Image (cartoon, rainbow, N blue to C red):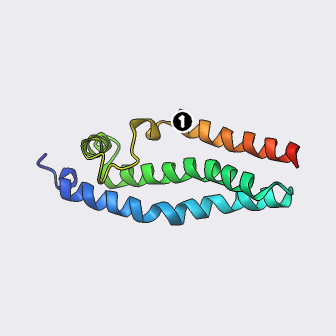
Amino acid sequence: MNQPELKPKNFKRISIINWLLILPLFFLFAWPFFYIAQFLNISTNISYAGAFFFALPFTITILHGHVTMALGELHRHHYYSWLQKKPYSYGLLFHPLVKRTRFRLFLLSTSFIVLAIGYFIA
């Protein structure tokens, strides 16, 4: 690890920036689903659940892209390995499954299923 971008100090900086970006990005991506659900007269609880499942994959994708831009595609696995070694601090809520596109598409499709169920209940 002679390269400065692969130092633990840089990994901490990337992790802190990601943690600071989670809530603004989450709300940025959640509100469209919530307003569409409210327009369709879907219950508020179902709207919140669907908005959660809708915003999460987009937020994860942006954060994954931030890591890729900071380290490069060839070196981002070093960051994810570092996160796995720190599961109770910087790696909190991190799991290798999160960076998989298939998981994010599952979350997105779950949000549409929640929307459909809420629509038929209402």
Q: Nearer the viewer, residue 43 or 30?
A: 43
Give percent across and percent down for residue 35: 76, 62
- Three-letter code, disc 1: Phe
Q: Nearer the viewer, residue 67 or 32?
A: 32
Give percent across and percent down for residue 43: 80, 55
Q: At x 26% / y 58%, what residue is drawn?
A: 12
Q: Nearer the viewer, residue 103 or 64?
A: 103
Q: Give the residue pinned by disc 1.
A: 103
Q: Residue furthest top?
A: 102
Vertical position of residue 59 compared to residue 16: above or below? above
Q: Is residue 99 left or right of residue 44?
A: left
Q: At x 56% / y 59%, what residue is drawn?
A: 26
Q: At x 72% / y 55%, what residue is drawn?
A: 45
Q: Nearer the viewer, residue 64 or 56?
A: 56
Q: Secondary structure at mark 1?
A: helix
Other residues around mark 1 within 10 Å, as few (<14) / some (14–19) / many (≥20): few
